[in-house]
Image (cartoon, grey):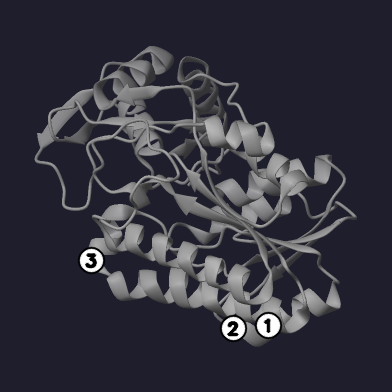
């Protein structure tokens, strides 16, 4: 099977590439290498696989429909895994137009390219943010998702609705995977776990919003990759699945785990809650297990030390000067 993987150079994309290659797939990676964070990190991710005979990386943008059509035809792709997106809740409040351009218009462009080339299998990354500030926990896939708190959340829900339209009109097989705060090696530097680790190791203050009681469900990257690969084997019709971790963890507990893994104590700068942030995320995984046999295997007490160990090694390998 040949898979077009959008967003292939990013954190999740690079791990999905690795997992797919290990499972015997041919991977065509597409990424525009934008500057949402340092493009050098994305290029480094691409270089990890450049010698693999069943991997081809192409630089391009999902918003360029003709480019996507040409790739799907040239490489005879069977399936698309769509990870390319403008990410982040807080930045979306400042630049909502960009988020809708990439996440909604870009997804529409991809769907049209698939329609025109006869590719009908799609696995798309969505987000737990679509649930808004729901008080019903854990979040189930049939819960309301029509009250987003940020443009990012609204854009991801809009993309889900578009994929359902193409399932209905053109018979696409679609799975929308709602990720819950994915972390692990090669994590984006603008994510909280990366920033906390860097600043705690350098004895610099970290900023916490609210009172530290907000909770998140964190998913180790290996589990996310397993979820995606499992879904490839069972993809049919249209469905939405939560891909989450074991349990929810408070913000203060997360900081404590990083303190334990680094051996340093955090200096905390407390700030008010930010617009668009939700108080909690928590995934009901029963449907994902029934659909694709998905169950997480890495608890955060194991995952954070793994990440910190990788982070220290990655920093040690950076060129001096």
Sort mark 2 into few (<14), some (14-19) or many (20+) by Cα contacts within 10 Å.
few
Q: Which residue is mark 2?
A: 64
Asked whether disc 2 touches disc 1, contact meaning CB atoms under 8 Å apart, the reply is yes
Q: Tag on residue 166?
A: none
Q: Is residue 304 above or below residue 2?
A: above
Q: Tag on residue 67?
A: 1
Name which quarter of the figure residue 221 lies in.
Answer: top right
Element at label 3: helix
Asked whether disc 2 touches disc 3, contact meaning CB atoms under 8 Å apart, the reply is no
Q: Could you tell me residue 217's position as x and y percent?
A: 40, 31
| Residue sitting nearer the eye, 147 or 44 | 147
Q: Which residue is mark 3?
A: 94
Asked whether disc 3 touches disc 1, contact meaning CB atoms under 8 Å apart, the reply is no
Which residue is pictured at 41% across the width and 67% down the height?
Answer: 158
Sort mark 1 into few (<14), some (14-19) or many (20+) by Cα contacts within 10 Å.
some
| Residue sitting nearer the eye, 17 or 216 | 216
């Amino acid at each position: 099977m040949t898979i077009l993987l959008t967003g292939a150079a990013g954190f999740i994309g690079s791990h999905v590439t690795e997992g797919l290659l290990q499972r015997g797939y041919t991977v065509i990676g597409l990424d525009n290498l934008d500057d949402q964070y340092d493009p050098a990190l994305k290029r480094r991710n691409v270089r990890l696989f450049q010698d693999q005979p069943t991997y081809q990386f192409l630089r391009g943008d999902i918003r360029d429909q003709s480019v996507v059509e040409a790739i799907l035809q040239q490489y005879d792709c069977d399936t698309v895994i769509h990870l390319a997106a403008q990410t982040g809740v807080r930045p979306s409040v400042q630049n909502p137009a960009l988020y809708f351009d990439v996440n909604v218009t870009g997804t529409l462009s991809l769907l049209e390219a698939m329609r025109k080339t006869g590719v009908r299998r799609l696995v798309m990354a969505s987000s737990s943010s679509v649930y808004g500030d729901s008080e019903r926990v854990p979040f189930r896939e049939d819960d309301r998702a029509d009250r987003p708190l940020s443009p990012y959340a609204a854009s991801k829900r809009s993309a889900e609705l578009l994929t359902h339209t193409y399932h209905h009109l053109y018979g696409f097989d679609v799975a929308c995977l709602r990720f819950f705060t994915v972390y692990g090696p090669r994590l984006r530097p603008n994510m909280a776990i990366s920033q906390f680790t860097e600043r705690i190791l350098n004895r610099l203050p970290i900023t916490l919003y609210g009172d530290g009681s907000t909770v998140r469900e964190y998913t180790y990257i290996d589990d996310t990759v397993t979820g995606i690969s499992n879904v490839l084997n069972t993809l049919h019709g249209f469905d939405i699945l939560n891909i989450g971790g074991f349990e929810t963890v408070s913000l203060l507990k997360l900081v404590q785990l990083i303190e334990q893994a680094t051996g340093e104590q955090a200096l905390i700068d407390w700030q008010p809650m930010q617009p668009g942030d939700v108080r909690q995320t928590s995934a009901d995984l029963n449907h994902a297990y029934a659909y694709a046999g998905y169950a997480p295997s890495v608890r955060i007490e194991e995952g954070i030390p793994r990440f910190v160990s990788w982070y220290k090694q990655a920093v040690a390998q950076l060129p001096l000067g």
